[in-house]
Amino acid sequence: MKLTLVNKKGSPESLLAEAAKDIPPSGIRKFFDIVYSTPDCISLGVGEPDFVTPWRISDTGIFAIKDGYTHYTPNRGLLQLRNLITTAIERQHGVSYSPEEEIVITMGVSQGLDIALRSIVNPGDEVIIIEPCYVSYEANIRLIGGVVVAIPTFAGENFRIDINRLKKAVTSKTKAILLNYPSNPTGSSIDSDTMAAIARIAIENNLIVFSDEIYSSIIYENEHRSIISLPGMKERTVYLNGFSKSHAMTGWRLGYVAGPQYLIDVLLKIHQYTALCAPSISQYAAIEAMQNADREVAHMRAEYTKRRNYIVSRFNEAGLPCLSPQGAFYVFPDVSPTGLHSEEFAMKLLKEQKVAVVPGGVFGACGTNHIRCSFANSMENIRTAMKRIDKFVKSL
């Protein structure tokens, strides 16, 4: 007997989550699908250090495998690593965290931010972000039903956060402000007066601050200052940092979250159910990184400084206004003098001169006239790329 089944509820595709369907694919990854098919291309688009992980860190990871340290760790992460992190935060910012109750080791800052947002944001809650900003922020908020409120910043204002714009953006539905400093993609940081004003807004309106400081070790002039160091801010700040940029450990996928216990208790539950713990091998390597790799971090920062000074001067000489970044390893030059918007500029540059840059519009509407260029590349490649860019601009 033949059984005929009738589907009365549509196709399986109709079962996909609306939030996941609605978010666009990463603008960076979409562009680099084209880049990877272009031979002899010099890429100034990759957002990771070009340095190899310092050998002492890698050796520690190798020995961790050989010695059998390949099992689960506590959900919060290895206590020795948490102790080192709390010591470092107190030394740098004068703020004390409990390694037993206020620190969680995560699989990079990306996972840390994801579970932090899920700990706080309910559907319909508004989260303020500062654009241009890292491409995942908006998607992470939307995936959990949050509402993104974007505050633009502009090169003409040195990408400084306008406090009046920020105040006007706060509503009864605002739950949090998400900061990234030094910034990806602009390299800008937050001056003391602006940071104090943001703290006042957060306290007066009972808001949480997500403070993504993954580039805090790559600072060029002034010392890095965290918002957690301001009175009343440790209690309402999620401090996010990690090892990817500072120690050239992007592939090791290791970061950490520090915060008040009431928040970390909730965050830890999400971490337990979604990841269990960060990779044990990476945690042992990070212990070595924190104890013995300061010299290597300083060397990388010195090299970035040379590259920054060169690439900024070359963009300005080419007629593309370019601010000198205060930190990170990106420049965000203005390409509007060419008459092209960022995506058109990037595509033509790739096709005609085989140099890959990231269109600034993927970081927010206020980045449309800009391109992001990473100087986490060899000086030789940067020099060659800038010659090609100069040639391209002159051809226009």
Image (spheres, rainbow, N blue to C red):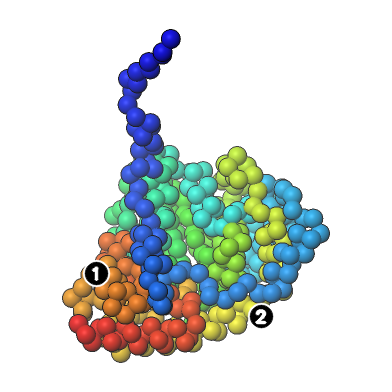
At 46% from the left and 68% from the top, the residue drawn is 47
For the residues labelled 1 and 2, the Cα–Cα distance comes to 42 Å
Residue receiving disc 1: 344
Figure quadrant of residue 146: top left
Residue 263: give x, y in percent of width and height. 56, 46
At 53% from the left and 84% from the top, the residue drawn is 303
Lower position in the chain sequence, tag 1 or tag 2: 2
Quadrant of image for the C terminus:
bottom left
Quadrant of image for the N terminus:
top left
Q: Is residue 188 visible?
A: no
Q: Mark 1, residues whose alpha carbon is within 10 Å: few (<14), some, or many (≥20)?
A: few
Q: Is residue 27 visible?
A: yes
Residue 322: give x, y in percent of width and height. 33, 80
Q: Residue furthest left?
A: 339
Closest to the observer, 379 or 122:
379
For residue 115, side relative to residue 279 (left or right): left
Q: Residue furthest front?
A: 1
Give the label on residue 295, or none.
2
